[in-house]
Amino acid sequence: MTCEEALKLLYDVIDKEASEYDVKRVKEHLNNCKDCMSRYQFEEMFKIFVVDKASSQSKSRQLKSSILRTIETSERHPRRITGGPFRFGMVVAAAAVALVLCIVAAFSVAKFYRHRVDIYPFEKSHMNGVVSNINPALSPVTDLVTARNFLANDMHYNFNSDISGLCLIGVEMEEVLGHQFVHLHYFDGTDQISLFIGHAEGVDLPDFEKRVISGVEYFKHVCRECQVIYWLENGTISIAVTENKNVDLTPLIPIDDYI
């Protein structure tokens, strides 16, 4: 991989996800490089970058513009660089080391970015509910009729809120990522579990592992704070969230509806 290729690949990583083949090439380059600097600084730098990108696209555009200018400069002057007595090759070699590390770091935090944008809002909503219900065993069920009417009339989805081993302690309508969801709060005697039900269209939850139970597909993701599963049924998406990573969330899946 040449320095220009590394530079262009970094642009691709920032602008869009590169292919698995690109990931492999970059990692091979990194493994063969004897002058690599510490990964930690670049990983931290890219974590900061993806957070900034989530909040402001202008910062992303500025970085991409800078990369493009460097690519154009290297293509116009492949053997020299102005502003110093050093050979261009040595300068580019040093820059390439940093670029390769940045690229690999970008891949290593790609899931961090996608989690923050697409999954974390559901976790945050769940944890806000846990904080608000100080004594969940005594919390009243509210708006259950409204929620059922929304599911039945707007989504043509007949939902049974009675789940064995779980106590329904709260119901509310909530907007997450611009989509309307019914948010049901359950309590299993120890932990709270949130169940979000809404239209599946436009909801993208990446990096989930596909699993099957009783012939029904569902998808699971475990992160630092929570475990999350979701399943699809007749145009709806159901998303279950809990902070206890050892709790089995599959009892929430209405297996009988698929038979």
Image: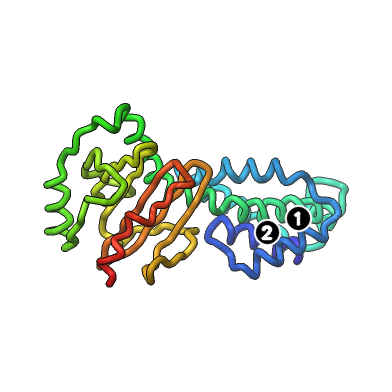
Q: Position of residue 94 (x, y in %)?
A: 80, 51
Sequence-earlier tag: 2 or 1: 2
State the mark number for residue 201.
none
Q: Which mark is residue 7?
A: 2
Residue 204 position (above or below residue 196) = below
Q: Give yes or no for contact between labels 2 and 1 (Cβ–Cβ under 8 Å).
A: yes
Please state the horizontal and vertical placement of residue 72, each as a whole percent of the image.
66, 60
Q: Residues within 10 Å of mark 1 (few under 14, many from 20)?
A: many
**56 up-or-down from 33: above or below:** above
| Callout 2 crowding tier (Cα within 10 Å): few <14, some 14–19, many ≥20 | many
Residue at image point 45% right, 65% down: 211
Give the quadrant of the C terminus.
bottom left
User: Which residue is more in the foreground, 60 or 75?
Assistant: 60
Q: Quadrant of the N terminus?
A: bottom right
Residue at 67%, 55% in the rendered image? 104
Query: Can residue 180 be spotted in the picture?
Result: no
* Nearer to me, 185 or 99: 185
Residue 131 is situated, as x and y percent measured from the top left of the image, at: 35, 30
| Residue at point 48%, 54% (across, down) | 221
| Residue at disc 2, secondary structure | helix
- In the image, residue 245 above or below residue 29: above
Which residue, as the protein is rendered here, is positioned at the far front?
165
Q: Nearer the viewer, residue 36 or 136?
A: 136
Q: Is residue 209 left or right of residue 154?
A: right
Viewer-proximal residue, 92 or 173? 173
The label on residue 96 is 1
Give the residue type that dot 2 points to.
Leu
Q: Amino acid at mark 1?
A: Ala
Q: Secondary structure at mark 1?
A: helix
